[in-house]
Image (cartoon, rainbow, N blue to C red):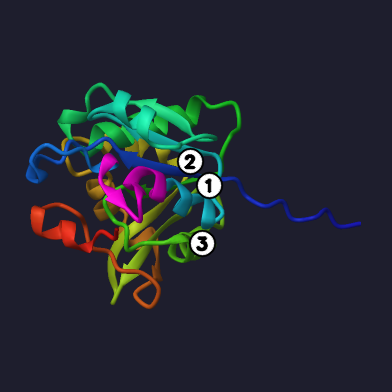
Amino acid sequence: MAQPIQEPIVAGLLLAAGGGRRLGGRPKALLSHRGRPLVEHAAHVLRDGGCGPVHVVLGASADRVRKEADLSGCVLVDNPEWEEGMGSSLRAGLESLTSFPMAADAALVVLVDQPGIGGAAVARVRAAYRSPETLAAAAYEGQRGHPVLFGAHRWRDIAASAVGDRGARAYLKAHAEAITLVECGDIAEPYDIDTMEDLARLEE
């Protein structure tokens, strides 16, 4: 009798440590969107897309984020080196996933400042998982963006390459031929909340 196919465990990894330097020092995690902190919204997006467990990397104003955002059920990861840039948060998140008791087959990475990306895009990229070697990313009119999925066998090398504010960019560029691009332009918008002008994209 054939064994049932086991559903892969795709963990959600939310990078939410940024200090919002171009936003007057307002931590991105605490920006208000639809009446709640942006970090809370992004954690729900990962769950809506079928990811779990969800690990959230905090940095700027981490104590305030813990108090003001409902992140119950999430694994909260402190990144004391958050000012070094996104690379340090990615390293902290992958280290947390590696040491977590529930072994995941892959990590799906979402950035806290992209509220135009919802659960539908997360689910679509998650569905591209094939093995612990999988590399997959959302694409917008053929251009690679977020979310990004990293099979567990790639975590160590990705972490080793994650420096400064580039995150996994260098690794993805070096392994471009291995990436499965998943078009999401019909269901998501990949804009960032980086400047004061961008705040207009957040909803009350």
* Residue 60 percent across, percent down from the top left: 22, 30
Residue mark closest to the camera, 1 vs 3: 3
In the image: residue 2, left or right of residue 79: right
Where does label 2 land, which residue?
153
Question: Residues under labels 1 and 2: Cα distance?
Answer: 5 Å
Where does label 1 land, which residue?
132
Vertical arrangement, residue 172 with respect to residue 95, above or below? below
Which of marks 3 and 2 precedes in the sequence?
Answer: 3
Q: Which residues are magenta?
A: 30-42
Q: Residues within 10 Å of mark 1 (few under 14, many from 20)?
A: some
Specify the amino acid type for callout 2: His
Q: Quadrant of residue 178?
A: bottom left
Q: Nearer the viewer, residue 49 or 127?
A: 49
Specify the amino acid type for callout 1: Pro
Asked if the residue at tag 3 contacts the one at tag 2, i.e. Cβ–Cβ closer than 8 Å, the answer is: no
Which of marks 2 and 1 precedes in the sequence?
Answer: 1
Where does label 3 land, which residue?
123
Q: Nearer the viewer, residue 200 or 181?
A: 200
Q: Quadrant of the C terminus?
A: bottom left
Q: For numbered disc 2, what is the local secondary structure?
A: helix
